[in-house]
Amino acid sequence: MIAEALCPTQYLISETCFAPYMQSVETVSLLFFPALAAALVVLLPYITAPSYKFLTACIVYMTGAGVAIYMGLSTGAYTSLFATLIGGALMLYVVYRTVVFRKI
C-alpha cells in the first residue's frame, strides 16, 4: 500500500497514516489532481477534434464546469470545485492562445 511506503510505522494505524504532514499532503492532492483532470478534459478533445477545435474545447469546459459545480456544491467540496474550475479555465486559455497564434 502507498500509506505503508510513505508513512512511518509509528503513525500507521489500521492502514491509515496519521503523520503530522498528511493533512498538507491531502490538501495539495485535493487541489492539484482535480485541476489536472479538468485541464486534461479540456485539452484532449481539443487535440482529437478534427475541426472546430476551440469550440469543442469550450463546450467540453462548460459541460465539465456544470458537472463540477453540481458535484462540488452537493458534496461541499469547495476547494476541489475551485481548483477544477481554475484548472479547466487555464487550459481553455492555453487552447485559445494556441488558436490565436496559429492564425498569425
Image (spheres, helix red, strand yellow):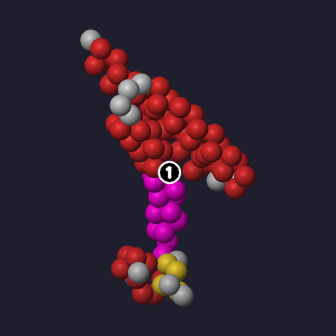
Query: Would residue 79 be seen by someone viewing this image from the given angle?
Result: yes
- Residue nearest the observer in this picture, 59 or 75: 59
The answer to whether residue 49 is magenta is no
The residue at 47%/58% (across/down) is 29
Q: Residue furthest front?
A: 50
Q: Is residue 89 above or below residue 36?
A: above
- Asked where in the image residue 52 lies, by quadrant, the reply is top left
Q: Is 17 left, or right, of 44 in this rendering? A: right
Predominant SS of the magenta segment: helix
- Asked where in the image residue 49 lies, by quadrant, the reply is top left
Q: Is 103 left, or right, of 25 in this rendering? A: left
Figure quadrant of the N terminus: bottom left
Which residue is identified by label 1? 34
Where residue 83 sits: x, y (%)?
53, 45
- Residue nearest the observer in this picture, 41 or 52: 52
Where residue 51 sits: x, y (%)?
38, 26
- Residue nearest the observer in this picture, 101 or 86: 101
Q: Which amino acid does label 1 sit on?
A: Pro
Where residue 68 sits: x, y (%)?
61, 45
Magenta residues (range): 19-35
- Asked where in the image residue 45 lies, by quadrant, the reply is top left
